[in-house]
Image: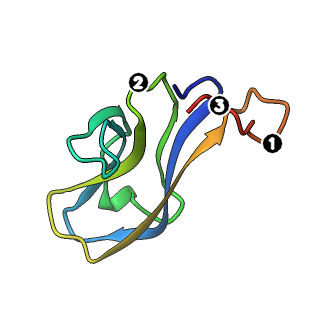
Amino acid sequence: RAGGALRAFATLTTALVGAGASIQAQFISSANGNLSTPTVVLSGPVIAVANAAAGATLMDLPLPDVAQRYIGFQYVISGATTTGGTVTSALVGGSDRNSSTIPSNLGF
């Protein structure tokens, strides 16, 4: 189980490059360690390349309960081939926490 005050967060650290392209971040879970046959748990908005500058937020959503054992992020590129762009993703503590640290025993 994962959830509570955690959020799924993804941001572009360098701009997406590719005329006509778009990107969407997805938080996924799977029964398999290699994340094959994933279940999409959360989806961020589709961001067009014109709005996909460095620092653009791809996802910032509360993490719901997740029943499957393995979790991760995947990114869907649509519309055109891309030639650049990097993403940073993480599970982060929610803004309602008094502490900047996340407890180590979350029941994963």
Residue lying at the far bottom of the rendered structure: 83
Determine the secondary structure under disc 1: loop
Answer with left or right where residue 31 lies relative to residue 97.
Answer: left
Answer with left or right where residue 32 lies relative to residue 78.
Answer: right
Say which residue label 3 marks: 106
In the displayed structure, would residue 107 be above or below residue 12?
A: above
Sequence-first disc among 1 and 2: 2
Q: Which mark is residue 81?
A: none
The residue under label 2 is which amino acid type?
Ala
- Residue 22, picture quadrant: bottom left
Determine the secondary structure under disc 3: loop
The residue under label 1 is which amino acid type?
Ser
Q: Which mark is residue 67?
A: 2
Residue at 30 percent of width and 34 percent of height:
40
**Distance Cα–Cα, label 1 vs label 3:** 15 Å
Residue lying at the far right of the rendered structure: 98
Say which residue label 1 marks: 100
**Is 17 in front, or is 68?**
68
Which of discs 1 and 2 lies nearer the camera? The answer is 2
Residue 50 coordinates in the image, percent (x, y): 33, 61
**Distance Cα–Cα, label 3 vs label 2:** 13 Å
Residue at 65 percent of width and 27 percent of height:
5
**Distance Cα–Cα, label 1 vs label 2:** 26 Å
Answer with left or right where residue 56 lies relative to residue 99.
Answer: left
Residue 105 coordinates in the image, percent (x, y): 69, 33
Determine the secondary structure under disc 2: loop
Determine crowd level at label 2: few under 14, some 14-19, many 20+ residues with C-alpha closer than 10 A: few
The residue under label 3 is which amino acid type?
Leu
Residue at 41 percent of width and 47 percent of height:
72
Determine crowd level at label 3: few under 14, some 14-19, many 20+ residues with C-alpha closer than 10 A: few
